Image (cartoon, rainbow, N blue to C red):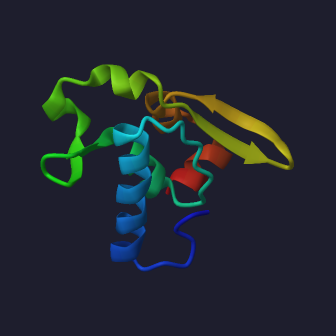
């Protein structure tokens, strides 16, 4: 987990650097984290070279960026959930609900 044990400000800085590599240098990224808020941030924001920070995807009209994002939840060494952010957020499964709290 790239932000495990970090304070929120430093965790955000790491997310900005990951997004910058992804969006400016077009590096494929796979982020493994226990912090769902970091995954949501990377899924819903992109790095703006002009502003030098993260910007919501919707302000760019870049909804296609969201389509490429997939979430995996692992449990007991296997894939427990695989899908889009909306599917994860709407899941009624007790294990997933507990993870999202």
Furthest residue in direction front, as rendered: 25
Q: Is residue 90 above or below residue 20?
A: above
Q: Is residue 65 left or right of residue 49?
A: right
What residue is rendered at 42% in x and 80% in y? 7
Foreground residue among 4 and 52 = 52
Q: How many marks?
A: 0
Q: Is residue 41 left or right of residue 54?
A: right
Quadrant where the N terminus sits is bottom right
Q: Is residue 74 left or right of residue 65?
A: right
Residue 72 found in image quarter: top right
Residue 23 found in image quarter: top left
What residue is rendered at 59% in x and 54% in y? 99
User: What x and y, as percent, mark residue 87?
Assistant: 50, 28
Residue 86 found in image quarter: top left
Q: Is residue 60 left or right of residue 2?
A: left
User: What x and y, as percent, mark residue 51?
Assistant: 13, 51
User: What x and y, as percent, mark residue 94?
Assistant: 64, 45
Q: Judge whether residue 34 can be spotted in this image.
A: yes
Q: Judge whether residue 43 can be spotted in this image.
A: no
User: What x and y, as percent, mark residue 33?
Assistant: 59, 57
Furthest residue in direction right, as rendered: 77
């Amino acid at each position: 987990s790239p932000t495990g044990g970090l304070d929120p400000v430093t965790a955000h800085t790491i997310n900005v650097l990951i997004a910058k590599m992804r969006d400016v240098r077009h590096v494929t990224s796979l982020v493994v984290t226990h912090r769902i808020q970091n995954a949501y941030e990377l899924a819903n924001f992109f790095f703006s070279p002009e502003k030098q920070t993260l910007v919501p995807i919707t302000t760019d009209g870049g909804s296609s960026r969201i389509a490429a994002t997939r979430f995996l939840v692992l449990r007991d060494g296997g894939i427990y959930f695989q899908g889009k952010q909306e599917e994860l957020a709407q899941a009624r499964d007790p294990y997933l609900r507990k993870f999202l709290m």
